[in-house]
Image (cartoon, rainbow, N blue to C red):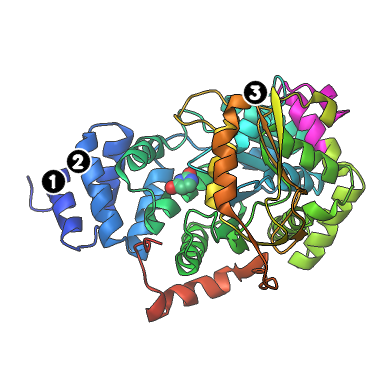
Amino acid sequence: MSASSPHPLHAIDLIRKKRDGGSLDEREIAYLVSGAATESIPPEQLSAWLMAALLRGLSLQETRFLTLAMRDSGEQFHPARLGRTAVDKHSTGGVGDKTSFLVAPIAAACGLAVPMISGRALGHTGGTLDKLESIPGYRTALSLAEFESVLAQCGASIVSQTPSLVPADRVLYALRDRTGTVESPGLICASILSKKLAAGLDALVLDVKTGSGAFLRNRDDAQYLAALMVATAEAAGTRTVALLTDMDQPLGQAAGNWIEIAECLELLRGLQPAASEDLRRLSLALAGWMIHLGGKAPTPEVGTQLAEAALTDGSALAVFTKMVDAHGGDVSVFEEPSAFHKPGATHILEAWETGTIAAMDTTAIGWAVQRTGAGCEKAGQPVDPHAGIFFHARRNDPIEKGQPLATLYAGSADKFPEPIALLKQAIRIGGSPPQPAPELIQHIFTRENAEAWLAHPDKVRGTASSS
Ligand code: URA
């Protein structure tokens, strides 16, 4: 080795360094990421490093190095060829969270390109791809060339990750899932942003959930993650904001697969059901920011007005229908969504006492939805497109004993006892006056305030609390 050539790296040294509380430099992180992508570092060493990173935390600098090294670990998409500004929205996951089916067509109807690379159900949360695949024929696995062609035709395309995009995340994510190392802000940030940045976005709007149905239930953890993602994506050159939003009850009325698409179709047709108002309001706010950051509106408020116009004048519905058709989906089922909904069995859960809906443990509700068959217990298992739960009451609503609280749909009636038991534990009907509900949109992190928030000594937390 010459005096100027850098010393060779060894995974064992990097594990020990992190274990003992050290910070890794850019070259050391790049070595681990390339070892993950090429599978030249064995899983036990990567897992040990992930656990050390989760327990010790990653600095802002380490998170940036990790995000960029992961972004660069595979092929990248170049939407500049489309001649439209490319924007996207990403949610950290929730129950009944179906905003993608509204914001993607709205933003495309306003002249932007939305190359949305989405995921499947994870833990208690639903998966955008599973919901789209409830539309007969919809293909989520497109090649990059097909993705580009759908985007050129429709302005929006929602697809699954390709094998060549961010291969390091595929390896690291699977290890995190099996080794209890998901809940680290730095690792979550690098995992999500590496995929978003590899899609070549000009702007990104993040919906970071907080509350009983979020992955990071603790509000401080969710705020830290939001600020961290904004600062990291901005440093990588992508205009980014994060909205901290309520996940203390399901979003909208439906949680499942087809029933979520059907709820969105109502809004895309310009209807405004009162019980879907939170879904409509959040989608318009997210789309408003996408339109603003994409340069089509001078402020997010004007963006929201444009978004509302696209929802009510039918242009977002036209984009959604065209996009589904371009993906091979049978759009004739949109004509009568309720006629297409054919679950094997239906059960109406009635309120077991009179009072007010005092609390909804939304993680437990998410598991109830999954147990109807709407989600899968093991990766790769098929999901039931018609399964799910439709909620007739929301937090703080008054309810009479015997009144329908939720309708459950499943492939067969023997699937009902477990989700019913989960719902009865998760939903508390109280007699006392309702408590004020958390705000739907609790905070907005922008490049102007995220760095300052992270610089505050009280806010420095590389590790998630265990709540
Ligand atoms: N979604 C991802 O893609 N990665 C994470 O780490 C968490 C949610």
Q: Check mark 3 vs ligand 1: CB closer than 8 Å? yes or no.
A: no
The kind of secondary structure element at disc 2 is helix
Q: Which residue is mark 3?
A: 139
181 or 108, nearer to the observer: 181
- At a point 33% along the width and 35% down the height, the residue shown is 37
The kind of secondary structure element at disc 3 is loop
Question: In the image, is 316 to the left or to the right of 100?
Answer: right
Q: Which quarter of the picture shows residue 119?
A: top right
Give the residues drawn in magenta, as a range. Answer: 319-337
68 in relation to 281, above or below: above
CB within 8 Å, label 1 to label 2: yes
- At a point 44% along the width and 73% down the height, the residue shown is 454
Kindly identify the amino acid type of the residue bearing the numbered disc 2.
Gln
Alpha-carbon span between mark 3 and mark 1:
42 Å
Q: Earlier in the sequence, mark 1 or mark 2?
A: 1
Kindly identify the amino acid type of the residue bearing the numbered disc 3.
Arg
359 or 289, nearer to the observer: 359
Question: In the image, is 238 to the left or to the right of 323?
Answer: left
Q: Residues within 10 Å of mark 2 (few under 14, many from 20)?
A: some
Residue 162 percent location from the top left of the image? 51, 29
